Image (tube, rainbow, N blue to C red):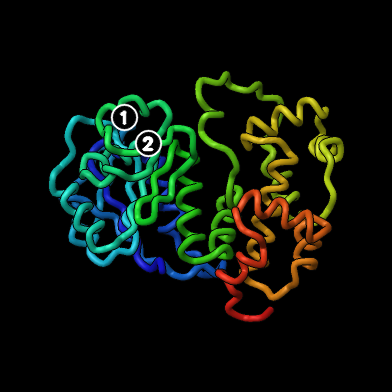
Amino acid sequence: MLKTVASVLMDGVAPFEFGVICEVFGIDRTDDGVPPIEFRVCAERPGAPLGTSVGALLTPEFGLDAMDGADLIAMPAFTIRDEYPEPVLAALRAAAERGATLLTVCSGAFVLGAAGLLDGRRCTTHWRYVDDFAARFPRAHLDPDVLFVDDGNIVTSAGTAAGIDACLHVVRRELGSGPATAIARRMVVPPQREGGQRQFVELPIPECTGESLQPLLAWMLGNIATEHTVASLAGRAQMSERTFARRFVAETGTTPHRWLTMQRVLHARRLLEETRLGVDEIATESGFGTAALLRHHFHRVVGVAPTDYRRVFRPRSAS
C-alpha cells in the first residue's frame, strides 16, 4: 500500500523532474477517488535552500530522518557528479534494507548506482547518459531502450515524460487502475504509453503543423468502444491523413491503431479489476467486439489471459 512518499533533494536538482513527482504524489486528489498520500520533501539539511539546474532555489521542509517509514522514496533528476553526499546514500541504503520502494526519474538512477543499490539489478536512465552510466556502474543490468524498469522495490525511468510513466505505474501497482487513471486524467496524459525510449534517440524535431492532439486523445478514450479509422480521426482533427499519422507518432510514439489497442487493453484490465462483467461484455465495452479479439490483444500486452488476470486481481466489490 502507498501511504507515505518521501522525495529526496540535493543541490543540482532538476525542477521539472521534481515537479513530476510532486504532481503524481504530492497533490491531494481525494476528490477524484485517490487515497490520501502523505508527501514529504527531504534533504540532508532541512530548511536550507538547495540550488537547482536552472538557477532557482528549493527549500526542503524535512530532514533525511523523514524517510523513515515512507513506503516510497522518489528521486528526481540531478546534475551528474563524481560523488554524492554519503548521508543521502546511507539513508537510501537503509530505506532499501527495510523494504521501501525506490523510484528514480532520469539521472536520479546515478544516485542509486552510487549507493550500490543497482548492482545485479535491472534499471534504465536517459538515453544520453547510458554510456556514462554503464562505465560507472558495470554491475547494473542497464536496459537503454525502455521507458522505465520495474525491478520490484526499485523502479527506474528514462527522461522526463518517462518519469510520469513510472510514477503512474507505481500508483497503479500499489493503488490500482482507478487512482492511476484519475491522476493521469487530471494531468491530461495517457495512463500508460507504449514503446521505448529508442524512438526518441537523435530524431529530428517534427514539424509543428497545428495544436496538440491531446483533446482528440481524450475524446478517443471517452469513446473507446467506438470504431475509429485513421480517416475518421484525421477528419475530426481537421488534418490530412498523412499529416495526422505523422503528428500522432510524434506525440505518442506509436500509430493510431496501436495506441488505441493499448488503451483498450488498459480499459479492459480496469474492468477486469473493478467489475464483475463477463469477458464478452468487457470485449464490447472496451471496443474489441469479440472475446477472442480481446484475449488475443490482452495476452500480447499483459502476458496472461483475461480470466487468469482476473483471478489474481479479483474485484473487491460487485458493480
Number of numbered tags placed on the structure image: 2
Evaluate whether residue 302 shows in this view.
yes
The furthest residue to the bottom:
318
Tell me the amino acid under the disc marked 2. Answer: Leu
Circle 1 sits in a helix, a strand or a loop, which is it? Answer: helix
User: What residue do we see at 67% from left, 63% from top?
Assistant: 306
Of residues 110 and 272, the one drawn nearer to the viewer in this rendering: 272
Distance, label 1 to label 2, CA atoms, is 7 Å
User: What residue do we see at 40% from left, 66% from top?
Assistant: 2
Evaluate whether residue 223 shows in this view.
no
Tell me the amino acid under the disc marked 1. Answer: Ala
Q: Residues within 10 Å of mark 1 (few under 14, many from 20)?
A: some
Residue hosting label 2: 142
Quarter in which the C terminus is drawn: bottom right
Circle 2 sits in a helix, a strand or a loop, which is it? Answer: strand
Residue hosting label 1: 134
Residue 277 located left or right of residue 47: right
167 is higher (above) or lower (below) than 284: above
Pinpoint residue 41: horizontal percent, then vertical percent. Answer: 29, 55
Of callouts 1 and 2, the N-terminal one: 1
Q: Are marks 1 and 2 in contact (CB under 8 Å)?
A: yes
User: What residue do we see at 75% from left, 41% from top?
Assistant: 257
Pinpoint residue 254: horizontal percent, then vertical percent. Answer: 66, 35
Q: Residues within 10 Å of mark 2 (few under 14, many from 20)?
A: many
Q: Quadrant of residue 229?
A: top right
Quarter in which the N terminus is drawn: bottom left
